[in-house]
Image (spheres, rainbow, N blue to C red):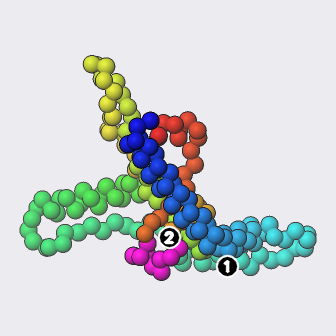
Amino acid sequence: MSNEDQKKSKQKTDLHEVWKKELDSCLRYHEKYFAEARKYEDIYKDQHNLDGLNRYNIFFANTETLAPLVYSKLPSPNITRRYKDDDEASKIASEILERTVSYFLEITKADTTFSKARKDFLINGRGLVRVYMEDGEIIETDEGEEVLDNTNKRVYPKRIEYKDFLTDHTAKNWDDLKWVAFRCYKTKDELFDLF
């Protein structure tokens, strides 16, 4: 191994250690929140009632009552031109964007995703939705080359569980965040493909 390879390996190891310490510190900081969130999920599902008494689950009732107030249906997209001049091209572009957003929300079943995130928000205080984009497929051309076909890319919203999301715990608001982390579940083969 050359000196340059050793330096790169040392830098990767140092970077790994920095992020490991950062994530461990953040997990310790959020430990109490995660325990409370699990407790509230159990109360909502009425799994805390193990003594067999037939009690009314007021937390479930309150959550279901608040749910339509927090989110009830998808908004209707309203995309307009910034300047109300007689520019026909910008008028057509805004109509195309409005229809595209409406179509996207419909075909991706965004309403279901947002409803699940709403329930998470009401139960444990953190309802997260993230937009994902799948890469195109790798196809082989007539010349035998492998190229990326981007014609079948898919963009979709996905609900993120509260325990799969971490932020820099030193920040007081969103603008002060230094980093945001999402946990991704991968198989061993998928990890080998990525790296």
| Residue furthest to the top | 143
On screen, residue 104 versus residue 86, left or right, reads right
Residue 39: % across, % down: 73, 71
On screen, residue 110 versus residue 153, left or right, reads right
Q: Which residues are magenta?
A: 168-177
On screen, residue 181 versus residue 133, left or right, reads right
Residue 143: % across, % down: 27, 19
* Amino acid at pointer 1: Asn
Name the residue rendered at 46%, 59% in the picture.
Answer: 130
Marks 2 and 1 in Cβ contact (< 8 Å): no
Image vertical order of residue 48 relative to residue 138, above or below: below
* Amino acid at pointer 2: Asp
Name the residue rendered at 31%, 19% in the picture.
Answer: 144
Residue 175: % across, % down: 39, 76
Q: Quadrant of the N terminus?
A: top left
- Work out whether residue 41 or residue 105 is closer to the camera in this orientation and state it: 41
Element carrying mark 1 = helix
Residue 126: % across, % down: 56, 71
Q: Residue 163, located in which quarter of the rendered image?
A: bottom right
Q: Is residue 155 magenta?
A: no
Q: Residue 28, located in which quarter of the rendered image?
A: bottom right
> Dot 1: few (<14), some (14–19), or many (≥20) neighbours within 10 Å?
few
- Work out whether residue 85 or residue 143 is closer to the camera in this orientation and state it: 143
Q: Check residue 168 in the rendering and tell me which mark sits there, or answer none.
A: 2
Q: Check residue 62 in the rendering and tell me which mark sits there, or answer none.
A: 1
> Dot 2: few (<14), some (14–19), or many (≥20) neighbours within 10 Å?
some
C-alpha span from label 2 to label 1: 32 Å
- Which label's residue is closer to the chain start, 2 or 1? 1
Image vertical order of residue 177 relative to residue 129, above or below: below
